[in-house]
Image (tube, rainbow, N blue to C red):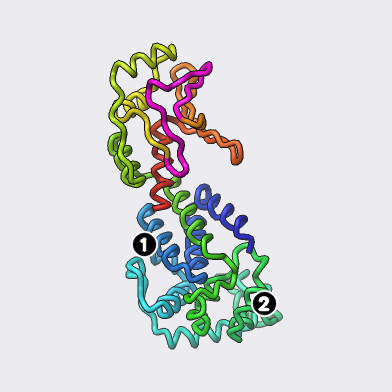
Amino acid sequence: MQRDDYLETAVRDVLTADEAAADRRIAHAALLLATAGATDASDRLVTQWHAVTGRPTSALADDAVHARAWAMLFEARGDRPQWADALVPLDLDAEEQAHQAFLVRRVSDLDGLFDGSPVAGAVSAIAPKRPDPIRDALAAADLDAWATLVENHPTPDVATLAATRSLTTQLINGADPLALGSEWPDQCAGALIAALRERHPTGPASLPELLAAILRLRGQRAPAPTPPADLAAAEQRLGLRLPDDYREFLTLTDGLPADVVFPRLLPARDLRADGSVVIVSDPATILLTHTGDNWRAVEVDLTYGSTAHASFRALLEHHHRLLEASA
């Protein structure tokens, strides 16, 4: 599995796919992280998905194999996270037997194609059967063989892996068969949580509350508000009236100190303009641009491409969601 390709596709699906497909992506990613022993990242992703969508966490285990996978992982880790309260407890001995039968069952290329059809049973009976080397590896509890067989698969079947009881202790203890590494799981969870919050925007209702939330997450204090004389002098010097949401921002704080991934926002006396562009940060990567009375905020990134936001407040809301995702 190519980690960067997986994460890029997963983020895109969470942002743009229909709800069912987005949920399937989150379900797969959460199990993927859990099978790499990254239980904290997995729990955080599921908890945030539930918080922003309002859907029950049982939706992430809506078939026998996924439900079994989570149950086996909880047994191996020795506890059940709070989000798992919505999952039905299972008889693990019975589930282990059912899963072993599932692993050794021979499969056909026609399996599933006629589900719900009157001829499904007949087709299943006459269709040629063949072994599945991936399931065979799990039936033999050969984790290395399984990893080799799925290493180029874009979305390996981690549900069937995690449901294999003889392997879950190794997984929880960090066997990491897909070689995700120690840092990638947190990066994956953070990126998907940020995408969820982009798709389901929530946050403080007012600009003062938004600013307070940002500062709390940063562990910083805001500078004093911009003196009215400084704001008036800045607008006179720039030759324009600044957008209302940015003016309100300046009445709350005269700029902001830098954050790890966010530049310093300038005080009003240091604002400068270049044509229709007002530079509001140092370095000059946060810009306010306007066409007539229509203002937008732009984040300039020469490496990954610039991002335009509908307003300065929208820029702050985006920054707030990223801070929440990394908290």
Q: Is residue 47 left or right of residue 31?
A: left
Q: Provide residue 2's location: percent of width, then percent of height.
A: 64, 60
Q: Provide residue 163's location: percent of width, then percent of height.
A: 50, 78
Identify the mark at residue 108; answer none if there is no mark.
2
Q: Is residue 31 above or below residue 226?
A: below
Can residue 73 be seen by looking at this rendering?
A: yes
In the depicted view, which residue is nearer to us: 2 or 83?
2
SS at circle 1: loop
- Residues shaded magenta: 259-281
Can residue 265 be found in the magenta stretch? yes
> Which residue corresponds to the image point at 60% horizontal and 64% vertical from the top-left?
155
Q: Provide residue 55's location: percent of width, then percent of height.
A: 37, 58
Quadrant where the image shows the N terminus: bottom right
In the depicted view, which residue is nearer to us: 183 or 310?
183
> Which residue corresponds to the image point at 42% horizontal and 41% vertical from the top-left?
259
> Which residue corresponds to the image point at 45% horizontal and 39% vertical from the top-left?
262
Q: Which residue is mark 1?
A: 56
Can residue 86 be seen by looking at this rendering?
A: no
Q: Is residue 140 above or below residue 111?
A: below
